[in-house]
Each structure stands twice: as C-alpha cells, then as structure tokens.
Amino acid sequence: MSDDHKPVVHQEKPSLETSPKAVEKTQTILQQSKTKLEATSGFLPPPGMLEEYEKISPGITTRFFDMAEREIAMEELALKSEIQINTALAQSYIKADQTSRVMAGVLFGFFGVLAFVLALLGNNVGAGILLSAAVVSGIKALLPSTTKTESPTPSEGQKKLPPPSDKT
C-alpha cells in the first residue's frame, strides 16, 4: 500500500471521568496552572518585583519612590503652566471682544452724527446710508461675541492629570 491510501482507524474518544478523585486532580492541575497577573502604571513595579529589586540593589525602593514623586511634581508643574496659559489666552479673548465692542460703539456714534449732518444739509440718500451703517455698528456693539474657542484637548500620548495639590 502507498502512503497516500492508509487505512483509517477509528478510535473512540476517551470518556471524561467524573469520579471525585478525577475532579480533585483536575482542580489541582488548574490551580497550579493559574498565573497571577499584576498590572502597574508609572515608575513603580509590582510589590513582589520591588522586593526582588531591593534584594539585588538595596535602597532602590527609595530611589523608585523619589523618581515617582519627581514625576508627579513635573506633571503638576505642567498642569499649572497649562492653566496659566489658558487663563492668559481667555483674558486676551475677553480684551479683544471688549475692544471690538468699543470700536463698534464709536462707529455707531460717528456714523450717527454724520448721518444727522448730511440730513441737515439735505442729502437724504447719504444720511440713510450712514444711518444704516450706524445701526449695524450699534447692533454689533450690543450683540455677544461670535468668537468661539475650544480648550485644547490632550493628545493621545498625553494623559489627563489630576487637579494639582495646594502644597506649593
């Protein structure tokens, strides 16, 4: 016979044992095969690993904690700087809006006076045009600003920081 045409031998599937001894053996194997998963973030390794590091290099735990504290301090400093920048930016937007309203008010008054003078001189068409400009300027001075700004959002690489502590 060639290797391509080997006879097929049917084997019975082994049956599962349900005896208490077999169940106990299965549970023991499962318990031994389970692994412990530890997830950490930041500079500090898991506690068990930290103990092993300390055995290899005494004092490393203190250095890890110092490094973590410095990282937190830097994150707080960055957050405070971002708050200061956003505050300054908001104040500049407010000042620009106020300046815009003042200019619109000045133009309202200027166009209104010019329209009145032209009406007295008999130029009703010019007075009407300037009066229209005065009304538009007046409306602009009274309307809220249409400038919309969005606060910058953290990029994917940046993490959202907790509020800074008042330890400064």
Image: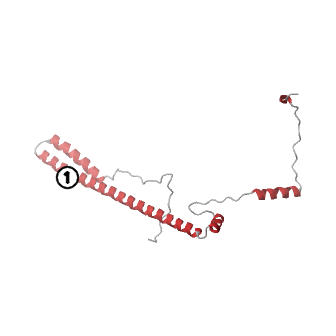
Q: Judge by depth and name the residue closer to the eye, 102 or 156.
A: 156
Give the amino acid type for the residue marked by disc 1 in the picture. Gly
Using the rendered view, name the quadrant where residue 4 is placed.
Answer: top right
Q: In the rendering, at what x and y percent does residue 55 appear? A: 65, 68
Q: In the rendering, at what x and y percent does residue 69 appear? A: 52, 67
Q: In the rendering, at what x and y percent does residue 102 appear? A: 25, 55
Q: Judge by depth and name the residue closer to the eye, 8 or 80.
A: 8
The answer to whether 141 appears left or right of 7 in the picture is left
Pointer 1 local density, CA inside 10 Å: few below 14, some 14–19, many at least 20? some
Residue placed under numbered mark 1 in the picture: 109
Helix, strand or loop at label 1? It is helix
Which residue is rendered at x = 57% and y = 70% of the image? 62
Q: In the rendering, at what x and y percent does residue 27 appear? A: 81, 57
The answer to whether 6 appears left or right of 89 in the picture is right
Which residue is rendered at x = 61% and y = 60% of the image? 40
Q: Residue furthest bottom?
A: 167
Which residue is rendered at x = 56% and y = 62% of the image? 43
